[in-house]
Amino acid sequence: MIKLKEISKEDAFRYMGGDYSSINEEELKILKENEKLLLENINVRYVYKVFDIDNETMMIGPNIKLEGQSIKNHLKDCNKVIFLATTLSSSVDEFIRKRQVSGSFDMVCADALASAAIEDALKLIDLELINRFKDKHLTWRFGVGYGDFPLEFQSTFLDLANARKLIGLNLSDGGLLTPTKSVTCIIGVSDRKLDNNRDIMDSYSHRCSICNMKDVCAYSKYNK
């Protein structure tokens, strides 16, 4: 069970398009107030499943294939994959909606804090996986829909991870995850050291340089 005691306010403010080093007292006060309230509404739920994968064909079992060159490159030399699904639960969606009543800045704060919170939760899950697979080498999390890995795989992913039943994760009619503050991703498991900044710890030291949204992302602007 994961229980967040705090949320990275620096990351949250970056998600809002700001530079945390220049935050003023009033902004920080509102950010802290929303952090306290949000923590009371977060219920981190996650599930992961491990599958064997054929590194040449990208097949998982006889019927499931991971499509796209991006995921193939990411899983080079991996013989297993971890399907990880994580959510902050529907209570967070409801909290963000309620913050609209308090004002636009409160709502923006709540939304940005929730985005930072799920990343904080995922970092703790990373540590759990590193400990479980301590004799292996893990890749960083590769999100469904990232690069040319089709977003349409999302439904199959949820089925394989049994995420609908186990953590209440579903898809909207438009194909988006619900609850909204949720993440689905694939982590590769290899017997050998990984190259090209693919190691799970590289996601922290190189997380902006390896992202294909780095040139248009407000977060990346201040993460130098």
Image (cartoon, grey):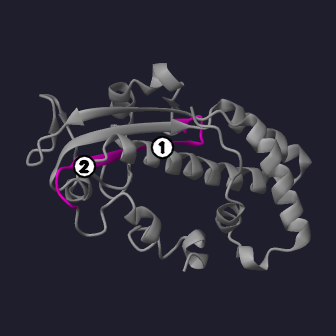
Q: Is residue 105 visible?
A: no
Q: Amino acid at mark 1?
A: Ile
Please indicate whether residue 198 sits to the left or right of residue 62 in the image.
right
Position in image of residue 103 (x %, y %): 88, 52
Nearest the eye: 180 or 190: 190
Position in image of residue 113 (x %, y %): 70, 53
Q: Amino acid at mark 2?
A: Lys
Q: Report crowding for label 1: few under 14, some 14 to 19, many 20 or more residues within 10 A (C-alpha).
A: some
Q: Quadrant of residue 9?
A: bottom right
User: Disc 1 versus disc 2: distance between alpha carbons?
Assistant: 16 Å
Q: At 59% from the left edge and 40% from the top edge, which residue is drawn?
A: 180
Report the magenta residues as a range.
Answer: 177-193
Q: At 12% from the left edge and 28% from the top edge, which residue is drawn?
A: 62
Nearest the eye: 49 or 132: 132
Query: Which structural element holds mark 1?
Result: helix
Q: Which residue is mark 2?
A: 136
Q: At 58% from the left edge and 78% from the top edge, which residue is drawn?
A: 221
Q: Across the whole image, how many numbered discs are drawn on residues?
A: 2
Q: Which numbered tag is attached to residue 168?
A: none
Tell me, yes or no, whether the highlighted magenta stretch contains residue 188: yes
Q: Which numbered tag is attached to residue 125?
A: 1
Query: Which structural element holds mark 2?
Result: loop
